[in-house]
Image (tube, helix red, strand yellow):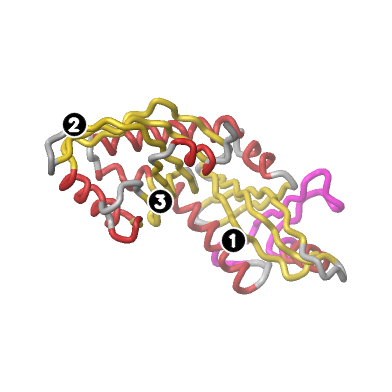
Amino acid sequence: MSDQNVEIVRRLYEAWQRDGFDVVPELMDPDIEWVNPSYAVEPGTRRGYAGFAAAARSFTSVYHESRVKDATFYDAGDRIAVKASMVSRSGGSEFPIDAQRGYVFDLRGGKVTRFAWFNNPAEAREAVGLTEQAVAQANVELVKQALDAFNRRDLDSYDDLYTSDFAGFPSMAGIVEGGGYTGRDGFETFLVGLHETWDGFRVLADVCRAIGERVLVLCRITGRARSSGVEVEGLGAMVFEFRAGKISRVRDFLDRSEAVQAARLAE
């Protein structure tokens, strides 16, 4: 049900982007609550469709042309935390406001029952029991599981580890066309190409470190080239990105310094 809850929240954002910020009955419980934080101009809770609509009108009367971009979803079962950039215009200003905000959606029976917002995205994560340290550790553990599954060629674990639109960008030329692949089918094609080129290809992590919401892996790459029969061992690196508790993107690097830079870590 947890994955379904993330999808429900994603659909709600899509509806708001398409039709404006208002009640969406097919995705909201009739007794939905809108919760403003204690530091809001008007703190407290509004209830029901009427209360939610009134709160939405109050918001849009101050912040015009609002839209959300770069949303990241944090899955906590029946509660979904979201970090997103809210872009809008305030009053008569011609200059847009672009600020990160945090949101929490509670769900029951396939509908949102509670909506809360926060100025700081970390507040939203903490509200659902996901501290920054806990999220980082969960991402590191997910990467370790993914590398173990990769070395075992365990394609059955794909759905548990990766988003449906996962994108991979191998560092070795010629394994996949265009330099990258997407989704489960693309991942399977990549594994087939790898098997045709290498025997016993493995990725062995020396360092697996969370950097913000990414994970940097410094690794050793081992295998036997099928064309020559020569055993090869080299150094490499990988940068993993995440969405809704799963891996959404990984890029491989032959140059570790490039990976460090990509993960925004100063040496």
Reply yes or no: does residue 166 show up in magenta.
no
Residue carrying label 2: 231
> Disc 2 to disc 1, how far (Cα)?
58 Å
Q: Secondary structure at mark 2?
A: strand
Q: Which residues are magenta?
A: 24-52
**Which quarter shows the C terminus?**
top right
Q: Which of the two residues, 22 or 225, is positioned nearer the viewer here?
A: 225
Tag 1 or tag 2, which sits nearer the N-term?
1
Residue carrying label 3: 163
> Disc 1 to disc 3, how far (Cα)?
25 Å
Mark 1: which amino acid?
Met
Q: Which of the two residues, 54 or 239, is positioned nearer the viewer here?
A: 239
Instruction: Indicate which label's residue lies in the foreground, 1 or 3.
Output: 3
> Disc 2 to disc 3, how far (Cα)?
33 Å
Q: Secondary structure at mark 3?
A: strand
Q: Residue at position x 68%, y 67% from top? A: 21
Residue 102 in percent (x, y) is at: 67, 48
Q: Which of the two residues, 70 or 20, is positioned nearer the viewer here?
A: 70
Residue 186 in percent (x, y) is at: 29, 56
Q: Which of the two residues, 133 or 188, is positioned nearer the viewer here?
A: 188
Callouts 2 and 1 close, C-beta under 8 Å: no
Question: Is residue 64 visible in this depiction of the protein?
Answer: yes
Answer with left or right where residue 106 lies relative to residue 225. Answer: right
Q: Residue furthest bottom?
A: 19
Answer with left or right where residue 90 lies relative to residue 83. Answer: right
Q: Residue at position x 60%, y 49% from top? A: 82
Residue carrying label 1: 28
Mark 3: which amino acid?
Thr
